[in-house]
Each structure stands twice: as C-alpha cells, then as structure tokens.
Amino acid sequence: MKGLKPKLRITVTVILVLWICLAAVYNLLKPVSNGCIMTYMYPTYIPISSTESVSSAKYALYLYHEGWRKIDFKDHLKQLNGVPVLFIPGNGGSYKQVRSLAAECDRAYQAGPYEHSFYHEASLSSEEGGEDMDAAVFQLPNQYTSRIDWFAVDLEGEHSAMDGQILEEHTEYVVYAIQRILDQYKESCEAREREGAAASGSLPKSVILVGHSMGGFVARAATIHPRLRKSAVETVLTLSSPHQSPPLALQPSLGYYFALVNHKWRKGYEVQTTPTGDHVSDPVLSHIVVVSISGGYHDFQVRSKLESLDGIVPPTHGFMISSTGMKNVWLSMEHQAILWCNQLVVQVSHTLLSLIDSRTGQPFLGTQKRLAIFAMMLRSGVPQSLNLMMQSQLLHRSAHIPIKDVKDASGSQVYTLPSCPGNVHWSDGGLERDLYIQTTTVTVLAMDGRRRWLDIQKLGSNGKGHFMFVTNLAPCSGVRLQLWPEKRNSNLDMPASRRVIEVTSKMVHIPSRPAPRQLEPGSETEQAPPSAIFHLSPEDMRGFRFLTVSVAPRPTMSGRPPPAASMAVGQFFNPEDGEREFSPQSMLLSTYYHKEMFLKEDHPLAFNLSFGISLGLFPVTLSLRTASCGIKNSGLPDEEAGHIENIRLCKLRCFPPVALAWDPTSGLHLFPNLYSETIVVDSSPALWSYTLGSEKTTVVLLVDPHCSYKTNIAVSITAAATRFLLLYSAQIVGLSFAVIFFALMRQAHAWDLDLPMPSMLSAVESNLRMPLPFLHLAVLPILISFFLSLLMSQPFPPVMSFAIVSIINYLLANGLIVILILVSHSIFYAAATIHVFIKTRSQMWEGNSYFGFLHWFFNLSSSFAPLKVVRRVNPLLVRALAAIILACVVHPALGLFVLPLSDAMCCHNSLCSFLTAFRSFAWRKELFDFNSDGKDGSKQFAYTSEQRGNQNSPLKGNSSNSPDSPKSFGDTQLEIFHHRHGLLMLHLLAVIMFLPSLVARSQRIWIGHSFPWFLDSMLSVGVILHGIVISKPEYNSLVSCPSILGLELSLNFIYLLAGYFSFLSGLALAPYYVFYAMAAIGFLLFTLRILRGRNGEKGFGSRKHSHRH
C-alpha cells in the first residue's frame, strides 16, 4: 500500500471505529439509575416429582411458597386449588428469579385490588377490536377470589440464547412441565377427596406462561408444540423477550428455529380453509393472548424492536408495551432489573389477578376480555401517539371512553361521560363565588373552593381552539371540569338535550416525583409536580359555550393533608404556535454548537418538538433553566426581588416541566421533572424493516406559561455512540463478512490477470476508493434491497437515513477488519522475525557442542510427533477429515477451528520463508554487484508462472539469483501469505460466530453428549470444503464454470456475489445467513474439483500452475 491517499483512507476509517467504540464503552460503563425499588420476599421452593426419568435427568420443576414458616411439602401440594402460572427463566437464568413476582402476587391477593381512581383508563383500540367490546368489560374486580400458584422450571442456567439445540430442549421440557402441573392439580384434588374434603372449584385446564428473556420465546415455542395438550396454554406474558429474531443472530440453527416458530405462529392465526376456499375451522391459536413487556432504552441486551409482536401476533390477540409507558411504572430498566423492579412487579401481579373470573375461579375464556384487561391494567391513559392526543376523544367511540347513550323527551341522542361518584361528589352549593376568567390562561394556586368560568367562544378564538390543563389535583376529589351549553346556576334545571357534560374522567395520570415536604401550612418552598394532564380539542368543545374548572374547598379532602402547593394551570392555545422543528443538520451541529431557545412569558403551555433524526439513534440532552416568573409585577419590594428570591419564587410558582415522547416501536416515554435530562427512546431507525416516517421522533414539552425559560438542546455524543453500536451490531457483523469477500474477490481478480496478489490491507483499501469500486460495492447492495422490497411488496424504509446509516456501518465494518488485519499482521511478523532470528543464530552455533546436543534432542523428539505418522498421507485430506468429524460429531466451532489454525501455520511458514529469502536476496545482491562489476550481460533467470507457487528454499535452482528478475522466491512466498491471510480472516470470523454456541454447550459436557444440529453441521462442512479446496493460491483458477450469456463465472465473480449476499444479510439483521454463502462456495468448488479429476485434467487451471509445495 503506497501513497498518501490510501494510508489516509485507512487511518480515517480506523480512527472512526476507535472513536465510536471508545465513546460507546465510556457511556456503557457509567452507572444507570433506573429508579426501581427493590422487592423483598421469604421464598420456599417445593420440588414437584417427575414422572419421566428422561426429563428429570437435567431439569426440574418447583412450586413457590411465600412465607418464613416451615411447611410440610406434601400437605401443601394437597391444598393446590389456585390458578397455575409457570415462570420460565431466560438465558443463564435461575428458577429462583420467580421469587419477586410470586411474593408480590401473594401480597396483592391479600391486600386486594388497587383503590379505584377516576383518571382516564386505557382500553383496546378499534384495530384491536375495542369497538366490539361492551363497556362492562372495563370493570375490574373489587376483590380477588382466587390466588395464583407460581411454578418455575429449573433449566440449569443454560445459555439458550446462544444455541438452537438448547432452546429446543428447553421447549420440550416446558411442554412436559405444563402437562405435569395440570396433572398435579388433578392429583391434589383426588388426594383431598380421599381424605373426605369437599370439592372446591373446578380443576384448571390451562396454565398461564410468564417468560423472561429467552424464556418468553420458549413459552411461545411450547404453545405450538405438537405434544402439548389442546388449550393447555391460553395466556402468555413475556418480559424483555425477543420475538422477531435472536439477540445474538450468529448461529444458523438458532435463526432457523426462530423463523420456524414465528412461521407456525403466523399460520396459527389464519383461518383454516380447503384448496377451494371453503371454511374448515377457526385459527388454531385463536384462543391465545400474548403480551410483551419491554424494558425500554436501558435494556442493552434485547431492544424493543426484537420484542415487538408485529407480523407474528395480530393486534386482536396481543400487543407490546414498554415499561416507560406502563401505568404506575414509567421507568426504563436493565434486562435483569425487570424481574425485581417493584413498581413493575406489583403492576404485573395485579394484572394477573385481574384475569381471574370470580364466578369460575379461573382465567376468563374470552380472548378479547383478557386482552382488554391487559390493556387497562398495563397501558396508561396517555394516548399512544401525538395525533391521537390532539384528536377528539370525547364524542367518538373509538376514543376508548365508555359512553352512555341517553335520549331526552324529544328522542334526540345525548352523549354523556361517567360522572364523579356520589361518595366523592361535592355540590355546587358548597362552592364560593364564581370567577370569570378573561385571559387564555387560568391558574389555580390554592384549593379555594371556587368555580372558574371560561368562555369557549371568546377565549378559543383566533385559532386557539385547543385547551390543555395540567394539575396535581386528583380528579373528582380535587378538581372537576365540565362543559356547559349555556350559563346556568345548576345542571338540574336544563333539558336532557342541553345538559352539562362531565369531562373530568378525561384527565390522564402521569408520573411525578414525591411532593416537597411541608413543615407547616404555608411553608411551601417549591411547586408540587403535576400528576395529570387534560386536553380538549375543538371537536370536543363544539356545541358548548363554557368550560368550568371547579376546585374543591380545602376541608373536603377526607382528612388527608393537602399537597405542598395546590396547582393547576390551563390554557387555550394554538398547536401551531408551539411547533418547533429540528432538522438533521441542526441536530448534528448541536454536538459542537448547543442550540438555545428562549421561551418568553405567556408562551404556549404545550410545545411540539419534532426531531428530524430519531432520538433512538441521536439522544438529545434537553436542559431548561427558569429565567423569570413575573416577579417584577408581583408587588414585592425591590430588595426581595433579587436573585435568591427570584429562584425561590419561581420554584414556588412554576410547575416542573414534563416531556412526553412517542416512538412507533416502543410507544410512550415520559420524562417528569425535566430540568436537565437526556431524552432517548428505544427505537431502531434506519432499518430495512422500518417504514417511512419512523426516522423521526415527536416530543411534547409541557412548561408553565407564567415563567420564561432558557432552553438548551444538544445531541449527546456518548449516548449516540452507544445506541449506534447496540442497534446496528448485527448489521456490522454481516457487513464484515462482505468486506472480506470483496477483498478475496480482488485477490482472485489479480491472480486471473497474472498480477501480483495484493495483501488484505491493500485489497480492503482499494475497495474504499471513490467513486469506484466503492459505489458498486457499498451503494449497489442498498439499491438491491430497495428492489427486493418492491418485489416482495414490502414498505420502503426511509431512503436517506437507511442509505446513510448502512454506508456508515459498512465503513465501520471496514475499520474493524482493518484493525483485525493490522493486529494479525503484527503478530505474524513478530513471530516470523523471532523464528528467523533464532534459526539464523542456530546456524551460527552449529559448531557448539551444547547446541549440537539440543539439536539432536529436538530431532529425536520430533521423530515421535504424531504428525510424522501422517506425513505419507495427503495433509489436506487429513485436515479435511479431522475438521469434518469434529464439526459433525462434537461441535461446528471445533471443526471450523482447524481452518484458521491451518491458515495461521501456513502464514507463519510462508512469512518465515519470505524473510529468509529477503535476507538471502540482500546477500546475493551484494555478491551479484561484485561479480558483475565492469562486465556485460549478467546472467538472468526468467520467472515463469510455473515457478510462482514454489515454497522450496531460495537456494534451490528454481529461484532467481538476479535482482532484476521479474519475480523472486520471496515474492511467491509473500503472495502465499496474502492468500492464506485472507482465508484466515474469513475462517476466524466463522469460528467466532459459533463460539457462543460452543460456550453454551460446554456447560453440559458432563450431562450427556448429543450431536449438533444437522443444519449447522452441513453448513460447517461446506465452509471446511471451501477452506481446503482453495488452500493454495493457484487453486483460484480452479473455478471456470461454463459461460452464461457469454460471461465466464470466475472465482472473483462468485466472491462478489457472496459479498452482496452477506451485505444483504447484514441489512436484514441476520448475519448467520453468511454461512449459506460460504457453504455454497465450498460445495461448488469441491464439485468442480471432483469433476475435473474425473475428466483426467491435471492441475487446476490452464492459466496458473505451480510445483508441489
């Protein structure tokens, strides 16, 4: 590699990779505060006897009991009469991880359901079948009638995320465990009847499955297993579980098993018909509901994109929700924290208990009813998108609000919302004098017991037709909102068609930190954070003249102490006034130049911030600092309006800002008390499977209009680097194989043209040259992906962001391969230099008697080496047989490891020969100059293509003794080194792909041996054949397929196709597909070699030939 530009390209690529990796590692090592509360318990694990000796050899089944007292296991099993729930641990997990869920479930059963609140509750959308649901579905039980019995499977902590065979064995045992649990209830019932106990309830017919991580996928795989009893599973709840593809998509069999299970699930929700289209039966999985809970952006192991159920489970039978938008949780958490985070565990416990029908003591049979309970208990009332938030949600049934249909005396239709119940209702007569608000902003600073009238026609004019209300007062007990068609003293003297509509139930609960402590009344030091938001659109207020905000008087708080500072702020506003758009260019510039935005007083209460690049890729740090809050007009003395007083009064008057972010994949993210926070959503933008518009993120910022703020928005570099590697690591792996294939293509092309074979570093660098070949190697596969999307009728990804991110990932893959090449080069040159130095010194010490003894000893020892036995046999055949046997009998990684080991040995030998030849050439050059001084026509030795592959000593007759020879022995050895070094890079990555599976399988080495999956073995055999057949550079001319359309299919063209296939595999986040390309090349080369041998052809091509090495 000569010249400044090539070195500059390589240097810039390596610096880019190192900078992103170091920034990502720095951010990952920082401690993460998730806000979770620890869960405590008193666990006891009761073993369940196994009836199958085969299953009990490795795994076990346990029943959990909560309590510190010792119990008799047999008596406890006799009393089983609850609802069975089976917990399935994930990758490397333990059955004891069930303790948090089981303990909180027991406490929830004893304490009873949540106290009913009057906030707006979520329900099913029209796409999920919510329009067909009765309002009674949303009524949760007042008490729990049946407890939950928690079972857990002990899977020996095996790493199921790394090996498909382990995953399949876990699935088979879970199927056995489900049926064993149902049999245990039958045995317990029979034991009680034998003792004379009366029958209590019906026996359970199904088991609820709760899986964590890979356990969630195992639960779905067990549900469709052919040996599972019919309707034995009807409800599946997964926690941080991958569904779309494995988190480590490296092993072919693992990817195949995921694809097989997902295909069966898609077929399971299709109506069974005959070839003529006649109806046969309902979908096989029509009775199953699946809910996936993701941990959000703090879960670095499984992203929300993998946890989505899109394309696997229809919306009428399941959904995914992030813990950041989960009711009473609102937190993102790590992969393991989701099992013990008390906020989430408690909510899940109440959800499972709410699934039980009080009449039967078993889960509801109706699919939509179970799904509706999941939606109501897990989802918050905040709309799942900004568009839904700004649309009318009052007069349409699709808004998920239970509406009562009432007719007045004239027969006209009247729509009413649920009113506040009588036990918390305070009469209008208890209110003091009314207040008439003349400004678009209304503020409540205390619970004064007054009703505020807002004229909708007057205040909602000039485009300010939306009304937003933010408060920390509880609905009904603290504040009430009503729409009035006209001003009256009471609602009772109005006709039914002109009645007041109670809209208090539209208040949506949002998270808030604890209110500041108050030592005595009137000693407030800062504003309490808001706990609810309320929005009315112009369609909601159409036909009404007034909106009233009634605040309860202080004595009506049922003995509870009032908050530190009662607060409510409402405003009529125009959404367009608060729109702020941040282009991709401005976001990128904000990394160096922070963009400030000043919000003056009387600004809109709600700001709509639109970011051109998804915050899942470029998280932004949003900082708000209070500048003023109208102190100069407050009437305070001048000495009290100083800086300290300014801060104190602003904290007391201005409510803490709140941010709500929406993402198409992970849903809602809330950031309360936002003064300086890094806003990030768990999206996966710029992927092949994403659709247009998914590359943007919308954030609604709620800020107090009485105060002015200095806002600073900047992209977090370290957070962006972390997100980039987490999102696109699988893509980079696939593109790394493409980089190696493109480099091998260049080497094969040079051999075909009888040019010096370039090194891997030079080949990679030449492929980065602009405009060619970079455009047809990096851009053409992206265009092919667009064509495939069009061919398969799939939605197009965002073109610009997808192309830019894919090219960046390709550059990162080039940088990683360059680093791998440089490191391996350094190791080989250091080892070869030491080897040649020792060998040279040994020749100088041959006369030494001590060295002679050592030389004799080493020769004697080497004569007994095992390799001596097989020297008479073809070493290629020995390596091939050893590798294939290891790959098919033990593990593919061990069989593939033979290839890089052989490549490394060959690289070392050829490099040692090159260095020896180089030194010999320097000595001969001096001798040649001395002998030819003053003479004409020194003797030249022609270098032919037949001498190119010879590895014999440079002192042999086939080497050139002239410095002017076209090629020397050293050049030949260097070409051999470059060729085997390229194969070493390819085979080393193949071994690394199978290493996680080898580690997982090594855990069970003493349990019993089982053969690898046939798919993994066959693909590994193909890779081995490729490494054996193409082990010598002259074999590059082996591939001379029959011409197609006049084009000869040479090896370099096959490598080009393999590179394109690997590129597309990386874009599809399925890097394990590269094994199909490598195996196809191996079987093709092996077949061509056999055919040439049968045809009696000697050598491996007419253009290249070499002597025996």
Image (cartoon, rainbow, N blue to C red):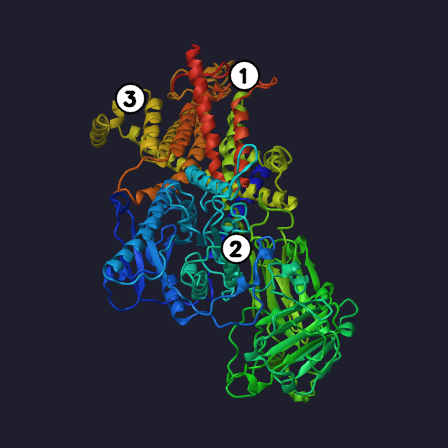
Whether residue 503 is visible to the viewer of this picture, yes or no, is yes
Whether residue 735 is visible to the viewer of this picture, yes or no, is no
Q: Which residue is mark 3?
A: 871
Q: Which residue is mark 1?
A: 1042
Viewer-closest of 587 and 83: 83
Q: Closer to the N terminus: mark 2 or mark 3?
A: 2
Q: Secondary structure at mark 3?
A: loop
Query: Which residue is pictured at 64% across the width and 47% down the height?
Result: 692
**Marks 1 and 3, how far apart at CA:** 37 Å
Q: Is residue 442 above or below residue 854?
A: below
Residue 652 place in picture, x, y as percent: 60, 80
The residue type indicated by label 2 comes to: Gln
Residue 607 place in picture, x, y as percent: 67, 65
The residue type indicated by label 3 comes to: Arg
Q: Is residue 305 above or below residue 45?
A: above
The residue type indicated by label 1 comes to: Pro
**Marks 1 and 2, how far apart at CA:** 60 Å
Q: Closer to the N terminus: mark 1 or mark 2?
A: 2
Label placed on residue 936: none
